[in-house]
Image (cartoon, helix red, strand yellow):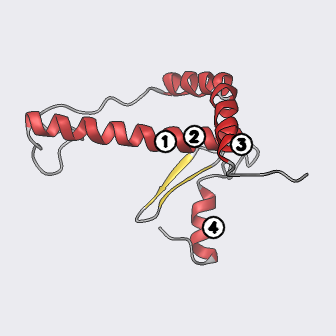
Amino acid sequence: MLVRNTHLGSALASYFSGTLTSPSLSPAHAVVLMRGHGFTVQGPSIADVVLRAIYTQQNAGIQTTSLLTHAAHFGPGPAGADVGGGGASVTFLSEEEGEGATEMTRQSALRPWRLWVREVEALGLYVNMA
């Protein structure tokens, strides 16, 4: 989805807002895939957003390769079957596992952030004049 007007912008923003009954709650989604356009990421800090963006792209590549490898071995399965084909299905993280993964990411976010900042500085990609 390419955001070209207020209606589309509002639709995208709705995924990053709290619930209607409790707008102060954390957003339900950290990443939103936009058909034909890529993805949008939100987070509490620029370091969190960069980390989520980088790892979302890497993990999507890993998942795609895994699903293609599975389909090559077991066959694509019948149309409308669960993701994975060949009688297998994807096992998603439980709510508890997702919360644990989010907390672990929060605690370890600064380690790769410092590395990425040094890489940008070493390559001269950004110069802070302040």
Residue 78 position, x and y percent, is: 9, 47
- Judge whether residue 103 can be spotted in this image: yes
Taking 104 as reference, is 82 above or below it? below
According to the image, label 4 marks what residue? 10
First of labels 1, 3 by sequence position? 1
First of labels 4, 1 by sequence position? 4
Marks 3 & 4, CB-CB < 8 Å contact:
no
Depth-wise, is mark 4 or mark 1 nearer the camera?
1
Q: Amino acid at mark 3?
A: Glu
Residue 34 position, x and y percent, is: 47, 60
Q: Which mark is residue 52?
A: 2
Q: Is residue 29 left or right of residue 25?
A: left
What residue is drawn where x is 61% and y is 69%?
9
Q: How many marks?
A: 4
Q: Amino acid at mark 1?
A: Thr
Measured Cα–Cα span from mark 3 to mark 4:
36 Å
Taking 52 as reference, is 105 above or below it? above
Q: Identify the element where label 3 is drawn.
A: helix
Q: Amino acid at mark 4?
A: Ser
Residue farthest to the right? 130
Measured Cα–Cα span from mark 1 to mark 3:
23 Å
Residue 128 position, x and y percent, is: 83, 51
Crowd class of label 4 (few under 14; some 14 to 19; many from 20; radius 10 Å): few
Q: Identify the element where label 2 is drawn.
A: helix
Depth-wise, is mark 3 or mark 4 nearer the camera?
3
First of labels 2, 4 by sequence position? 4
According to the image, label 1 marks what residue? 56
Q: Amino acid at mark 2?
A: Arg
Marks 1 & 3, CB-CB < 8 Å contact:
no
First of labels 3, 4 by sequence position? 4
Marks 2 & 4, CB-CB < 8 Å contact:
no
According to the image, label 3 marks what residue? 121
